[in-house]
Image (cartoon, helix red, strand yellow):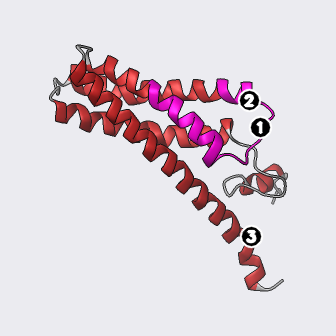
Amino acid sequence: MSVRGADAAPRSRLHRLLREIVKFGAVGGAGLLVNLLVFNVVRHATDLQVVRASVLATIVSIAFNYVGFRYFAYRDSDKSGRTRELVLFLAFSAVGLVIENGVLYVATYGFGWHTPLENNVFKFIGIGVATLFRFWSYRSWVFKALPVGEESFLEHGKDRKAQPDRVA
């Protein structure tokens, strides 16, 4: 096999991973805008406390993101277990909600940073930390099946690990 042929498979897997990251980012970016918009509208239009307004905004963005992930970013994943997929999505999203709003809670009530600018900065930081968790969990557990014949870049090394190690 030529060097060019040997490089084709890893490049193809890397290309699929990059495409997945871009799609995840597009949905996530739109979800971020929805989250921050709802958060700020609720904060300024109601008397809800900052973390409660943030939780409400996060819930709205979770619903928005599910539609985007299911029908755009991961539209080629297995569609046979929708109930399982939705339950896992909601469970991992709930963990992300706790991460995201935990950062805001600590900043607001732990450190007393409660101006609108500080609220938005720590909401954004919380979203960023939670996004790393969500990307890993959604691709690993929720939308994990790829079309037949395709292999995930991150799954590639597992085949080698499944083989018994040689004893020297």
Q: In the rendered structure, find residue 9 and report the number of the disc placed on it.
A: 3
Q: How many marks?
A: 3
* Picture coordinates of residue 62, whole percent (x, y): 50, 30
Q: Which residue is mark 2?
A: 82
Image depth: mark 2 or mark 3 in front = 2
Label 2 to label 3, Cα distance in Å? 31 Å
**Residue 34 lies in quadrant:** top left
Region of the chain picked out in magenta, as a range: 59-87
- Is 42 above or below relative to 165? above
Identify the residue at image location x=37%, y=41%. 33
Amino acid type shown at disc 1? Lys
Q: Main secondary structure of the magenta part?
A: helix
Marks 3,1: beta carbons within 8 A = no
Mark 3 closeness class: few <14, some 14–19, many ≥20 residues within 10 Å? few
Q: Is residue 121 above or below residue 55?
A: below
Q: Quadrant of residue 156?
A: bottom right
Identified at 17% across, 25% down, the residue is 114
Dot 1: few (<14), some (14–19), or many (≥20) neighbours within 10 Å?
Answer: few
Asked whether 66 falls inside the magenta stretch, the response is yes
| Quadrant of the snapshot with the N terminus | bottom right
> Could you tell me if the residues under marks 2 and 1 are in contact, i.e. CB atoms within 8 Å?
yes
Amino acid type of the residue that numbered disc 3 sits on in the rendered structure: Ala
Q: Counting residues from the N terminus, which is met first, the one under dot 3 or under dot 1?
A: 3
Give the residue displayed 63% in from the left and 66% down from the top. 15
Residue name at image x 27 percent, y 34 percent: 122
